[in-house]
Image (cartoon, rainbow, N blue to C red):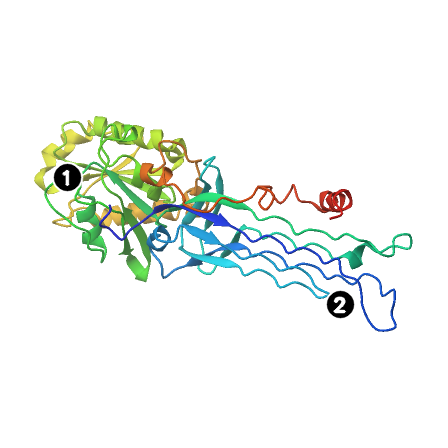
Amino acid sequence: MAESNFIDYVKILCRSGKGGAGSRHYHRAKYVPKGGPDGGDGGRGGHIILRGNRNMWTLLHLRYQRHIFATDGQSGGANRSFGKDGEDRTIEVPIGTTVFDAETGQFLCEVTEDGQEIKLLRGGKGGLGNCHFATPTNQAPRYAQPGQPAIEKAVILELKLLGDVGLVGFPNAGKSTLLSSISAARPKIADYPFTTMEPSLGIVQYRGGQSFTMADIPGIIEGASEGRGLGLRFLRHIERNAVLLFMIPADSNDIRKDYEILLNELREFNPELMDKSRILAVTKSDMLDDELREEMMQELPEGIQTVFISAVTGYGLTELKDILWREINDESNKIVSTITHRPLDIRHRVEEEDEFIFEQEPIDDDELMLLTDEDWNDEFWEEESSVNPD
C-alpha cells in the first residue's frame, strides 16, 4: 500500500485555538480622573472544522500534514476593544469519512454530504473584560476573565466508500471481473491471488436509466481476523453498503463451507454486519451444465438467495441486477438505516498509523487543559473569574 495513492486510514493531531484574555484597562482621558473600567473582551480561538468534498477520493493529503492547529484569539484592548478571533482551520475530506478518538477508539462524527461542515474541536471562548464586572459596590474591578484554553486531540480518520452493494469473497473469486463487466470501472484483473490491493467503486447501469453503485474490496481468507493475508483492513468499506453480495466460484470444493468462513470473518470484524441483506452469487458458472447446476443446488447454504452467474459470458447477470435492485430498494435495506459505527479496537486499527508519534514542542499545562465543552460552562467560568481575579 505504500506505493498507492489510495489512503483510507490516517492519524492526525488537531488543536483548536485558545481564547484571548479580557482586558483590565481603565479609561484614561484628560479631565476624567475616574473614567472607570473599559477593558474589552478577548477574541475566541479558532475552530477545527471538517468539510466534505465530493472531488476528493483519498486521505493522502493528510498523511503529509499530520498537525492541524488553529490560531489563538487575541486579548481585548482599551475602550472596550474586542480582540481578534483566531483563524479557523478547515480540513477537506472525501465524502464517507468517519472520525474516531485515537486514544479511546470512540466514534466522534462522520461526513456524508458534499459541503457538510462539522466542528471537530471548538476554539476557546474569549474572556470578558473588566467592564462586565463593574457593580455599584465594586465600581473599579481589577480583574477580567482569561480566555478558555485550547483543546488538543489525536484523531483517526477512516474513509468508507459509499456504495449500495459490497462484494465479499476469497481472492480470485471473480469480484473484479464482475465489476468490470457490469460497470465502467477497470480494476486490475489477473490469474493470481490478491490482484486487487485497494477498493474499487463502479456505477452499474440498470433499466430506465437508473443506476446503483458497487464496491469491490480485496479478497479475504480464512483467519483474516487474525491478520492473515491482507487482514480485515478493507472490510470497513462494506460497513456502509446496503446489500452484501457473496461471491464463491463454481469450482469450490464446498460452497457452503466457504460461505460460512466468509460470514465468520465478517462477524469477527463487526457483528452488526450480520443484519445486512445478503445474496450469494456462484461465479464461473459457464463451466457448469444443467445437471451439475441442479446437483449444486442441493449443497448451497440455506436461507440466502442464490444466483448462478458468469461475468465472462454474461450468463445470469441480468437476473443478478434484478435481484440487487429489488434488495437495494427494499425499505428495510435503505443505506441510511444500515450505517454502523463500531468503536476502534485492535482488529480495526492499522498498526503503522496507530504507532505514529507526533513530533511537537511540549506545551505548558497552564496553557493547555484538556477539558470538554461541558466542563467549561458559564457557571464554572464565572466562579473561576471570581476565585482567580488575576
Asked whether residue 327 appears in the rendered view, the answer is yes
- The spot of residue 17 in percent (x, y) is 56, 53
Asked if 141 appears above or below 339 in the picture, the reply is below
Label at residue 79: 2
Asked if 166 appears above or below 118 in the picture, the reply is above
Q: Is residue 54 left or right of residue 132?
A: left
Which marked residue is nearer to the observer: mark 1 or mark 2?
2
How far, Cα to Cα, is label 1 from label 2?
73 Å
Label at residue 66: none
Numbered disc 2: secondary structure: loop
- What's the residue at 35%, 41% (across, down)? 353
Q: Nearer the viewer, residue 59 or 186?
A: 59
Numbered disc 1: secondary structure: loop
Q: Nearer the viewer, residue 104 or 314?
A: 104
- The spot of residue 45 in percent (x, y) is 59, 56
Q: Which residue is labeled 1 in the image?
A: 193
How many labels were placed on the picture? Answer: 2
Q: Along the polypeptide, which appears first: circle 1 or circle 2?
A: 2
Q: Nearer the viewer, residue 220 or 183?
A: 220
- What's the residue at 13%, 28% (across, down)? 253
Kindly identify the amino acid type of the residue bearing the numbered disc 2.
Asn
Residue at the extreme right of the image, as rendered: 137
Q: Nearer the viewer, residue 16 or 7?
A: 16
- The spot of residue 372 in percent (x, y) is 60, 42
Q: Quadrant of the N terminus?
A: top left
Asked whether residue 58 appears in the rendered view, the answer is no
- The spot of residue 13 in percent (x, y) is 45, 47
Kindly identify the amino acid type of the residue bearing the numbered disc 1.
Pro
